Each structure stands twice: as C-alpha cells, then as structure tokens.
Image: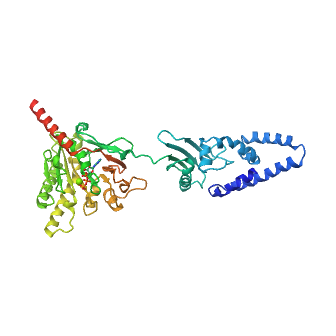
Amino acid sequence: MFTLLFLPLAKVTTWDDEAWYARFVVSALATTAWVGLLVFVPGAIIACAVVWVVLLLCSLHVPSLRNLLPFWRWLLALRHRIKGDSPEFIVERVLGLRPIEDATTDFKGVRDYVAAYSGYDETGEAQLEFACGLSGVTDEFVEKKAKDGLGAMGAEVFKVDHLGPGHWLLHFWKEEPKNPLDDAIEITASDLDDWDGKTVTYGLTEAGEPARLSYAQTSGIVVGGVPGAGKSAGAMLLTLPLLASPKASVAIFDGKGGMDWSWAERSASLFNNDCDLDLPAATDQLETLAQRCVDDLKSHPWSDSDPDFWHAGASALHPFHLVVIDECQTLFDITGRSKEEKALVERCKRAVATIVRKGRSAGWCVMLLTQKPTADSIPTNIRDNCVVRFALRVTTREAAEAVLGSIPDGDPRPTEIPAPRRGGAVVQGEDGHTQSVRFAYLPVTEAAKALESSTLDTVVAGLEA
Ligand SMILES: Nc1ncnc2c1ncn2[C@@H]1O[C@H](COP(=O)(O)OP(=O)(O)OP(=O)(O)O)[C@@H](O)[C@H]1O
Ligand SMILES: [Mg+2]
C-alpha cells in the first residue's frame, strides 16, 4: 500500500535520477516480502520486528536501507509532513519541489536538498531558501513549482531569486507588495542642503536610500522620458543646489520656450528660453561655452600644476560649470530644417560634443533633457560619452535604449515605470549599474523661494565680510 502511495510520484521523476525506479522496485518487493512473511509464516512477527529494528538502526548510517522499510520510511518522514511550517512541508507538500526522500544524499541527511523557511511576517512576505543539486531541478522547474504553489501558499505574487548554481530564494507575498517608489516624495525649500561642491541628493532609491548624483568627474548627463514624466521637475532638484551655490555656474537653455525654468532665470549665468525661435543666438552661446571649456582645459586656472579640476574641487573662485539643455531636440533635430539651419544644428552638436568629450577634467558638464529620446534628438556619439543617464517613463524599448543603451536582462526597465509614478526613473551611473529611483518633488514656488533666500544669504555674507 505504501509503495503504491509513491506511484503517482513517478510523474515527477523527470527531474529526479533514474535511481528512483530502482528504489521504487526495491520498496515494492520489500513490502510484498514483509506482508508475505507476516501473513503466511506464523510467529514471524517477532523475527520481523527484530530485523526491522536492526535495519532501522543501520539506516541511520546507510539511509538507502530505508528503502527496505517503506512503512517506516513513511512514518519517519511524517513528522516533517504534518508540521505545516517546516521547510520540508513547504518544499515537499506545498510546492512539490522534492516529494520523496532520497536515499543517497549530498547533504548528509536523508534529503538531497537543504531548505530554510520563514513564514509570513507582518509585511505579508514568506521566504523559502532552497538548494538542490539534482540535475533536473532547473530554474524553470523551480519557477514553475513556485507559480503552481501560489494557491497552496495562499499567496498572490511570487518571485524567485537565483542565488547561485542550484540555489534559490523564493519569495511569496499574500498581496502584491507595495513599491516604496509609488508614494510621491514631497519636499520643501527647507529640506534642501547647501551644495558640497560634488553631490546632490535628488530622491530615493527602491531600497529607501537617498538617491545621489555626483558631478565630480562627470561631463555628460542624459535625461529622457515621455512628456509629463517629470524630467524638468527632476532636473530642478539636480540643478537647484548648484544655482544656489557660489561654487557652480549654471547655463540654462530651455528648448520648450515656456516658463518651466523661469524660477532659475535670475540665478543662472546664462538663460535662454528662445532657442526654438532664435537658433543662431543659441548656437553662438553654445560655441562660446565650448570655447571657454577648451580654454579652461588648456590653462587650468585652478592650479599651476594639476590639470584635473576635481582634485582641488569646485570653489567660488573656480566654479564648476553646468550647461542644461531642456528639450534638446529643438536644438539637435534636423527634421524639417532648412539648409542654413541644418548647418547651425551641426555647430550646436559639435559644441555640446566638445564639452561632453573634454569637459570632465576641466569641471564642465552638459545635462541634456528630451521627451523624444532617439538618435535624432541625442546624437549617439554624445550619448555614449554621457556616463550618467536617467530614463524616466518611456513607452518603447527603442526609447529606453536611446537613453540607456542596451539593458541587461534582470535590470529595471523604464518601460515598466507606471504612469502615475511621476519622477520615477531608471538611472545608470558611471559604473554602468542601473537602479530604480524616484525624484523628490519640489513645487516651483518653493524653488524660487530657496533661490531668493540663498541670494539674500550671499548678500548678507558679503555685507558682513
Ligand atoms: N517627482 C515627482 N513627484 C510627483 N509629481 C511630479 C514629479 N515630477 C513631476 N511631477 C508632476 O508632473 C508634472 C510634469 O512634470 P515635468 O514638467 O517635470 O514633466 P516633463 O517630463 O518635463 O514634461 P515635458 O516633456 O512636457 O516638459 C509636474 O507639473 C508635476 O505635477
Ligand atoms: Mg519639461
């Protein structure tokens, strides 16, 4: 009977070794023999009991001997199987990952897997760590079992982390876990710190840590995303501390030509929100900036001997230069342009490419924002030299790749950012590592307030000095 109980499990042996059949046959024969002895040989029960005890004791050292005692084996395993939250119960009964014990084992026990289970905690998450060396237990198999086990686990969502060869961590959640980035992060002017000359804190990462951008050794930043994704609002947090600081000089080109950047007009060293109407002027301005960058590179005014701006760092005397170009497609896209305009666009591209290529050690950086992330809006040679890239929500893979380049499997994708999560982004840093973040949100009025008080501070400091 107990051997027959194992029979349906033959179906899952695709992932098991061939020895399963051998064990099954041995168990069947042993059962038949024991029953035969007990029924047909009077008084055999005592002899049988003695042999069972001896076999049981021996099986402590040689687990495969348990195959001769299917009933005892079943009984020994019972304690695991009726204890609802033991790892064995979850693995074997709930998920069916390893439905019967194995005779020979790599894990010095009676099972050829090891597992640790922690039941649902207050966040509604249960975890099962599972390691198994059987060749048939593949990623797909574990994934499928976890999926099939959702109902039995009383869970709505699962996730399988691959920790190494034959080693997995299965997460089960009773309900779809809430993403910490789905809540807007509202801040006010008083939450802003003074710029330290290098980094700005602009929001939160998925792990709940502060998200930071370092301008040191960075000469190009690309920000792309659909209209309304939160690019300009995000760029405000990246630039406001610099605009408020004497250690940076910020030039702003707003291709949209609206009021998006009017809060910064008075603090910027150069402010142009007419680039769409007056391309020649914007071209001249960009070329002048590029020339100043090249001059800085040649004469490195911050030090006689050290050619790297960042070794001494930004100071009021030698500020860091940031050039922001919002809706940069208005300067770079040649669609529908006349021949003369195309020549101007070429010059703009060359000026920007110069700063991006040469600016790093001279303390210059360009930030390009666009709602149309294609090679037409951000020339790939410029994008490839921009090591920091922010992809806010986009709708196509092409757009995502125009910002980030090809995205490795398993990395967060900007196409998966939900529309209501404004300011949500996938950021790729200098090391090529990507992570999900969300920009904090500072209303424009607050930004203007922060700049006013910083101007006041500067004036007061000037008077006191
Ligand atoms: N981090 C954020 N958190 C919450 N809301 C935000 C955030 N960023 C932006 N928003 C909201 O989204 C609106 C649009 O943002 P923003 O103007 O920055 O978009 P955009 O990507 O620059 O769009 P466009 O391409 O049209 O210029 C803002 O007015 C604001 O209400
Ligand atoms: Mg904008």
Residue 326, given in percent of the width and then of the height, sits at: 21, 54
249 in relation to 273, above or below: above
Q: Does residue 343 sit above or below 407 in this rendering?
A: below
**Residue 220 in sight:** no
Where residue 84 appears, as percent x and y from the top left, is 61, 42
Q: Is residue 296 left or right of residue 198?
A: left
Judging depth in this view, the residue of 245 and 151 nearest the camera is 151
Q: Is residue 96 left or right of residue 447?
A: right
Q: What residue is drawn where x is 63% and y is 58%?
A: 14
User: Who's the residue at 86% across and 48% down the image?
Assistant: 37
Instruction: Pinpoint residue 336: horizontal percent, then vertical percent.
Output: 19, 69
Whether residue 191 is situated above or below residue 224 in the rendered picture:
above
Total numbered circles? 0
In the rendered image, the residue lying farthest to the left is 463
Compared to 97, does 379 lie above or below?
below
Location of the C terminus (image quadrant): top left
Left-right relation of 375 to 83: left
The one nearer the camera, 261 or 304, is 261
Where, by quadrant of the figure, is residue 194 drawn? top left
The percent position of residue 131, horizontal first and vertical second, equals: 57, 47
